[in-house]
Image (cartoon, rainbow, N blue to C red):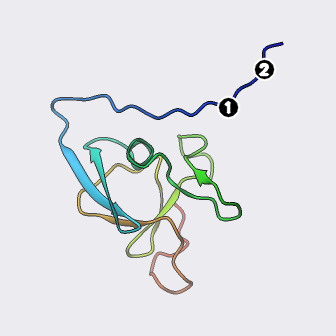
Amino acid sequence: MRSLERTAFSLKRLEVAASAPVEFLVDGRKVTARKGETLLAALNADLGHVRNFEFLEERRSGFCWMGACQDCWLWTSSGERIRACTSLVETNVSLSTSAPEAGAGAGAGAGA
């Protein structure tokens, strides 16, 4: 039997000449993406992960990449919860990897 090895990998972004660069903030950190990318693809390519796991000290990079699981939630500055895998990058947006405190945003806890 072949042994299973855990190897590190990083996503590589395909360069598209017509795709303009887009910048946005996640937890106050500037992220550079390409217009037309999902937040999930952009965060994994730029940061290597989407968010930190709530229960353990590990990073999460998304699970299903198609909107079926609960692994890539982000929150907008207004408190709206969005899925990184199905949301496209937008310029000058500020996102958080942590849920806002109860009552902090009008859309807090709203499903996408």
Q: Nearer the viewer, residue 10 or 77?
A: 10
Asked whether 46 or 85 is in front, the reply is 46
Mark 1 residue crowding within 10 angstroms, few (<14) / some (14–19) / many (20+): few
Residue 41: image location, x then y, percent: 42, 42
Identify the residue at image location x=45%, y=70%. Answer: 80
* Placement of 63 over or under 59, stated as above or below: above
Q: Give me the C-alpha separation between circle 2 and circle 1.
A: 10 Å
Residue, x 34% and y 41% (percent of image)?
A: 37
Q: How many marks?
A: 2
Q: Residue furthest right?
A: 1
* Secondary structure type for disc 2: loop
Q: Position of residue 24 (x, y in %)?
A: 29, 59
Q: Which image quarter: residue 20?
A: top left
Image position, residue 97 (x, y; %):
49, 64
Query: Helix, strand or loop at disc 1?
Result: loop
Above or below: residue 71 compared with residue 6:
below
Decide if residue 104 is on the left or right side of residue 42: right
Residues at circles 2 and 1 in contact by the CB criterion of under 8 Å: no
Query: Measured along the vertical axis of the image, is residue 12 above or below residue 72?
Result: above
Name the residue at 20% across, 36% down: 19
- Split into 4 quadrants, where in the image is the N terminus? top right
101 up-or-down from 112: above or below: below
- Identify residue for label 2: 3
Residue located beneath label 1 in the image: 6
Quarter of the image for residue 58 reads bottom right
Residue occupying the point 53% across, 69% down: 98
Query: Residue lying furthest bottom in this view?
Result: 103
Q: Nearer the viewer, residue 61 or 104?
A: 61
Q: Where residue 9 sits: x, y (%)? A: 52, 32
Instruction: Determine which of the numbered discs, if any, sits on residue 69 in the image.
Output: none
Q: Hey, what amino acid is under mark 1? A: Arg
